[in-house]
């Protein structure tokens, strides 16, 4: 096995090339850094490495210097020369690119000291941002394929499954089914061929954990799948990944080729006689394909419509053969459970849901990004300690977890420990890990309408209660938002929601009403304000609000004028209050968000 | 005469479960899936055209009409929604004078929405062809199109 020469001692510049940072030109930054190293004569002693997502997307593009552990944020191409000259050549880190603590404004040089990272515990994301995902040696140097090695040098399939069972790993796709039990079910079946399927059809709007994991550490997911194949007696795996994730697909393809070359994949793996092949199946954009049976039909090239269960997929899955389907994060966890032992894993987090939870923390939160915490951490710790609280110092209103199948939780639930069971009892779900923070300027009826319009469109149409029910519920929500709600609408929403839950076959239908029911449960007063007073407390529903200027507060700075898309705000004279032309105003709220003096009033 | 699709379809002949992969490959080549292509895929894979059409209409990725030269995709993910993505979409519609899934008359632009591009820290986000624009406001959206009109 060839290793990087001097990999341990050589200095490295890690440039984040996850989708977020690439969108802000990180590839060009890497090229610029490389050029500078060459022109300043450091190309031999310093290596520039592209990495996957480091998680702190809010501060991207991110550049880290190792082994120093120095963290640079919001880096631009023009900063490359200074980083190379000042830091790498002269040993003086570039302080102006350090992360600054928002409260104290103190610059923090090392990423381990930044609040966003300090409270995290990274198991699934262990390598994300630290290795080059396109170089298998980086993964091996970080302890990769040790789990597979251990499995193939003496463990029986039963022992592997026992280890996974004892770790109490529960499926990270959202439902939380015990992984060991699923694998045992597939091992028991004598029908062959059996299949291993990785669900990377991350269709939840507002979620990007699986994509980031695949982009940053594809080998971890593949290693977990090979171990699963050995444990259940399967020789063929499929990774079902969204076609909308081109970077993840590209890196997986590279990883598959490299793993084959090194004997971790293909015929006679590591000389053990065990054979396992892996194929990528590209999804074509259907949310319902996140459901196991629908996903398997989609791999078969058919319309992805869920079927009645039982039989469960461990008995009759892909091409009606025994199949284990797990989420990206579940597979990525397996190798470390094997290499570090089930006791280690079971000791993290809460006793019934051990391990960690990965969230894509987004919305009106200061630090958007990928967050991994021990199960049982509270929502408050995630949103306020790690996430830095609500943007612009506004008041927290709700947090939405679990995507379109999840629910919205209000501030009095902030101390809820996050795990499968507690979120469920509060009316939301763990889901695959989207976590969207909402502030006072969010209308909860509008949020319910937003999710229903999504599920209504994505309903596959097989079950009438889902196909027709979501449409009817959406119609009511739309009319409430338009100020045409009637007394009795809330009760009607509740009744029809129950019908959809009872009458739908799959998880999409059964959970589609969750956003409606949870917003009614916690924010009924907002529904009532819309219906009875024709008022939108969040200031979002256009038919119910109007904008005006507080002439006392307006300083005439003209910022709103500059930002208004329809020239509805007019600055007649500098430093005099602006005028708002109601005819031209489209109520988009841009002026409200732009104003630094709270001079825009929404009523 | 051999059709230009024959070469593309050849590796998929007699394979199971390839319908979606074939459609993706053909759409990549032609930009959309015209009626004639569906018929030819049907003959090659020995699957009825109606079944193929059923697959096409089920998945958001497939199109049966051509797209404009540039594709504008406004993200409708949750993070973008709570940060004002709806107002951005409205503004882009006004700028281009078209609705979602429509193309401008000169076929310069097609407007689409996407469930989530996963760049939530950049919310609200908009993608034009390969370029991602982050923290877009209605005003910024107007500026982007104004600049493009100036360039073109």
Image (cartoon, coloured by chain):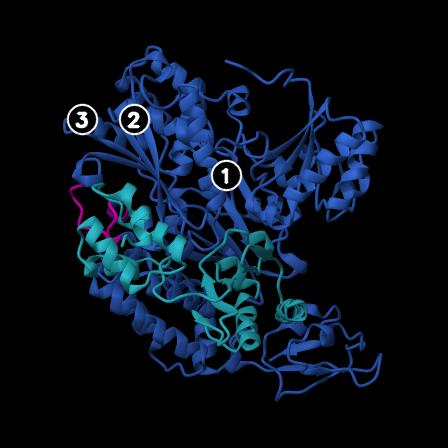
Chain colours: A blue, B cyan
The lab-note entry on whether marks 3 and 2 share a chain reads yes
Q: Which residue position holds label 2?
A: A229
Describe the element under mark 1 as helix, strand or loop.
helix
Q: Which residue position holds label 3?
A: A188
What subunit carries mark 1? A
What subunit carries mark 3? A
Mark 1 neighbour density, 10 Å: few (under 14) some (14–19) many (20 or more) = many
**Magenta extent:** A297-311
Mark 2 or 1 closer to N-term? 1
Q: Residue furthest front?
A: B1
Tell me residue A218's x, y (percent): 46, 33
Q: Which residue position holds label 1?
A: A215
Tell me residue A3's x, y (percent): 56, 16
Q: CA distance from mark 3 to mark 2?
A: 13 Å
Tell me residue A17's x, y (percent): 59, 40
Mark 3 neighbour density, 10 Å: few (under 14) some (14–19) many (20 or more) = few
Of the pair B139 and A299, the residue shown nearer to us: A299
């Amino acid at each position: 096995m060839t290793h990087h020469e001097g990999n341990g001692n050589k200095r490295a510049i890690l440039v984040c090339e996850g989708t977020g940072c690439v969108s802000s030109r990180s590839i060009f930054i890497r090229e610029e850094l490389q050029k500078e190293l060459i022109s300043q004569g450091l190309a031999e002693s310093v290596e520039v490495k592209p990495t996957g997502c480091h998680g702190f997307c809010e501060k991207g593009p991110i550049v880290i210097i190792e082994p120093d552990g120095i963290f640079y944020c919001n880096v631009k191409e023009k900063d490359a020369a200074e980083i190379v000259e000042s830091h790498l050549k002269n040993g003086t880190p570039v302080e102006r690119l350090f992360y600054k603590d928002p409260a104290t404004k103190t610059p923090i040089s090392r990423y381990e000291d930044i609040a966003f990272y300090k409270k995290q515990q990274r198991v699934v994301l262990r390598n994300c941002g630290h290795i080059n995902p396109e170089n298998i040696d980086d993964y091996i140097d970080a302890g990769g394929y040790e789990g597979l090695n251990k499995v193939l040098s003496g463990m029986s399939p039963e022992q592997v499954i026992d280890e996974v069972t004892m770790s109490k790993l529960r499926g990270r796709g959202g439902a939380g089914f015990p992984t060991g039990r699923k694998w045992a079910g597939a091992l028991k079946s004598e029908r062959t061929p059996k299949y291993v399927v990785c669900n990377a059809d991350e269709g939840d709007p507002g979620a990007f954990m699986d994509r980031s994991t695949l982009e940053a550490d594809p080998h971890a997911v593949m290693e977990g799948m090979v171990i699963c194949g050995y444990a259940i007696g399967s020789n063929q795996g499929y990774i079902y990944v969204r076609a909308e994730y081109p970077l993840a697909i590209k890196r997986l393809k590279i990883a598959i080729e490299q793993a084959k070359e090194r004997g971790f994949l293909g015929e006679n793996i590591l000389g053990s006689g065990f054979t396992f092949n892996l194929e990528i199946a590209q999804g074509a954009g259907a949310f319902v394909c996140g459901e196991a049976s629908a996903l398997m039909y989609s791999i078969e090239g058919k319309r992805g419509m869920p079927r009645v269960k039982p039989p469960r997929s461990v008995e009759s899955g892909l091409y009606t053969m025994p199949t284990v389907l797990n989420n990206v994060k579940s597979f990525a966890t397996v190798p470390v459970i094997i290499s570090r032992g089930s006791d280690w894993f079971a000791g993290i987090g809460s006793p019934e849901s051990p391990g960690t939870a990965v969230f894509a923390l987004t919305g009106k939160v200061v630090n958007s990004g990928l967050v991994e915490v021990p199960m049982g951490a509270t929502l408050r710790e995630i949103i306020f300690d790690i996430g830095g609280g609500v943007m612009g110092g506004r008041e927290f209103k709700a947090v939405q977890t679990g995507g379109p199948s999840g629910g919205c939780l209000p501030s009095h639930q902030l101390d809820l420990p996050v795990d499968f069971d507690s979120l469920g009892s509060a009316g939301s779900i763990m889901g695959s890990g989207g976590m969207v923070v909402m502030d006072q300027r969010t209308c909860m009826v509008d949020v319910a309408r937003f999710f229903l319009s999504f599920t209504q469109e994505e309903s596959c149409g097989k079950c009438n209660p889902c196909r027709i029910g979501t449409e009817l519920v959406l119609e009511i929500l739309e009319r409430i938002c338009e100020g045409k709600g009637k007394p009795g609408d809330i009760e009607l929403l509740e009744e029809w929601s129950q019908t959809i839950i009872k009458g739908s076959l799959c998880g999409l239908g059964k959970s589609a009403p969750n956003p409606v029911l949870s917003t009614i449960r916690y924010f009924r007063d907002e529904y009532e304000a819309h219906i009875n007073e024709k008022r939108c407390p969040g200031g979002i529903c256009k038919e119910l609000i109007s904008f005006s200027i507080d002439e006392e507060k307006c300083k005439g700075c003209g910022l709103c004028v500059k930002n208004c898309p329809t020239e509805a705000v007019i600055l007649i004279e500098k430093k005099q209050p602006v005028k708002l032309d109601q005819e031209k105003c489209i109520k988009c709220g841009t002026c409200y968000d732009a104003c630094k003096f709270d001079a825009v009033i929404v009523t | 005469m051999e059709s230009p699709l024959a070469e593309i379809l050849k590796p998929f002949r007699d394979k199971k479960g390839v319908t979606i992969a074939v459609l993706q490959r053909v759409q990549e080549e032609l930009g959309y899936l015209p009626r004639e292509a569906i018929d030819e895929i049907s003959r090659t894979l020995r699957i009825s055209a109606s079944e193929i059409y059923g697959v096409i209409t089920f998945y958001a990725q497939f199109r049966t009409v051509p797209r404009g030269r540039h594709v504008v995709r406004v993200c409708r993910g949750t993070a973008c929604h709570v940060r004002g993505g709806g107002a951005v979409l409205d503004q882009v519609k006004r700028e281009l004078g078209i609705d979602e899934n429509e193309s401008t008359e000169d076929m310069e632009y097609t407007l689409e929405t996407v469930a989530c591009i996963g760049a939530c820290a950049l919310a609200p986000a908009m993608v034009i062809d390969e370029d991602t624009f982050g923290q877009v406001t209605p005003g910024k959206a107007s500026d982007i199109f104004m600049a493009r009109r100036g360039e073109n």
